[in-house]
């Protein structure tokens, strides 16, 4: 219990000393995390938008002007394929778009006449899994009266490179942010250690162990990381709200904050980075001092 009390109280003292003496470090960590969360929010939102367009089981058939819907459905049914049909007139087409991007006021204001009529074919599950979508789409393109054909797999192929590039970019940003945060925490603790070097020398005289010194600094690093993370989460939430209200107010693109499980995962990574950085910093400092007994 005494060890826990010492760790908690000493960690709080170190944390508040860091805030008073080096508030810039907290601001720097908060800024780094905020930029990371903001970039992730944009990337996460773009990925969700792409996923909505990549249903491999559906084929959208846009017919030429003047072609009767019933005639087109008869022609398509003669192909004898494992599909079901659904007709979307202009109003239904607009309603479908609004369902995909709810709240897009600019789309809602558009007249119904601007939305093209189309027929949606939905493949049976086994057919989609067997890769027959491409063959069906090619057969549909040959039917008279068909203007264009779009299907999820084709869209997915077009956008897969975008998702892959986005993943590589986020991986690079994650590594860069982690290293930057670790360096900031390392330097902040190093400055505190130099300021309290005389106290550490006194610990030598009473036979203190390395863990007696290291653990409070690790706890202080956890507190600093948690404080900075909360500020960054708040800043990212305000950023998303501001962008949606002022920049994307009349757009079909929506910005989402990461779900809470991802927020929790990011925090665990940040905590692990802070603890590791603090341990390496204090341990290396004590080794150079050669003044603390082995635990």
Image (tube, grey):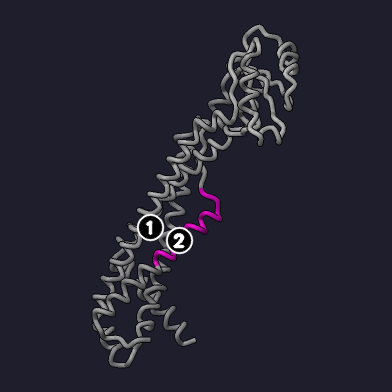
**Residue 11: which quarter of the image?**
bottom left
Taking 240 as reference, is 197 left or right? left
Callout 2 secondary element: helix
Image quarter where the C terminus lies is bottom left
Q: Residue at x 71, y 9 (%)?
A: 68
Of labels 2 and 1, earlier in sequence is: 1
Foreground of the two, 31 or 171: 171
Q: Position of residue 246 (x, y in %)?
A: 45, 36
85 or 229, which is in the foreground?
85
Q: Which residues are magenta?
A: 258-274
Dominant SS of magenta comes to: helix
Q: Residues within 10 Å of mark 2 (few under 14, many from 20)?
A: few
- In the image, taking residue 113 as reference, residue 281 lies left or right, namely left
Q: Is residue 291 above or below residue 43?
A: below
Mark linked to residue 259: none
Residue, disc 1:
178
Q: What residue lies at 28% left-to-right and 68% top-to-bottom?
A: 21
Find residue 138 and report its horizontal and vertical position in percent.
Answer: 61, 20
Residue 149 can be seen in this image: yes
Q: Secondary structure at mark 1?
A: helix
Q: For residue 269, which numbered disc appears in the image?
A: 2
Please state which of residues 205 and 152 is positioned toward the viewer in this rendering.
152
Q: Is residue 38 magenta?
A: no
Q: Distance from label 2 to label 1 (Cα)?
A: 8 Å
């Amino acid at each position: 219990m005494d060890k826990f009390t010492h760790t908690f109280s000493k960690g709080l003292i170190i944390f508040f000393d860091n805030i008073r003496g080096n508030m810039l470090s907290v601001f720097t960590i908060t800024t780094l995390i905020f930029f990371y969360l903001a970039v992730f929010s944009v990337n996460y939102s773009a990925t969700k938008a792409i996923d909505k367009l990549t249903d491999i089981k559906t084929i959208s058939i846009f017919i030429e002007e003047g072609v009767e819907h019933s005639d087109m459905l008869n022609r398509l049914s003669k192909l004898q394929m494992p599909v079901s049909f659904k007709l979307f007139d202009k109003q239904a087409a607009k309603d479908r778009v609004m369902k995909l991007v709810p709240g897009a006021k600019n789309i809602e204001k558009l007249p119904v006449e601007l939305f093209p009529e189309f027929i949606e074919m939905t493949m049976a599950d086994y057919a989609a899994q067997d890769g027959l979508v491409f063959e069906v789409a090619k057969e549909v393109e040959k039917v008279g009266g068909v203007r264009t054909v779009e299907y999820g797999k084709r869209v997915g192929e077009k956008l897969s490179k975008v998702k892959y590039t986005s993943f590589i970019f986020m991986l690079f940003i994650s590594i860069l942010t982690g290293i930057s945060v670790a360096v900031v925490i390392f330097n902040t603790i190093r400055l505190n250690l130099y300021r309290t070097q005389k106290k550490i020398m006194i610990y030598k005289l009473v036979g203190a162990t390395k863990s007696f010194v290291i653990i409070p600094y690790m706890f202080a690093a956890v507190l600093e990381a948690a404080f900075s993370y909360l500020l960054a989460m708040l800043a990212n939430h305000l950023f998303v709200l501001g962008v949606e209200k002022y920049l994307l107010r009349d757009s079909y693109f929506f910005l989402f904050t990461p779900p809470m499980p991802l927020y929790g995962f990011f925090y665990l990574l940040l905590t692990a980075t802070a603890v590791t950085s603090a341990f390496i910093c204090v341990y290396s400092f004590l080794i150079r001092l050669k003044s603390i007994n082995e635990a």
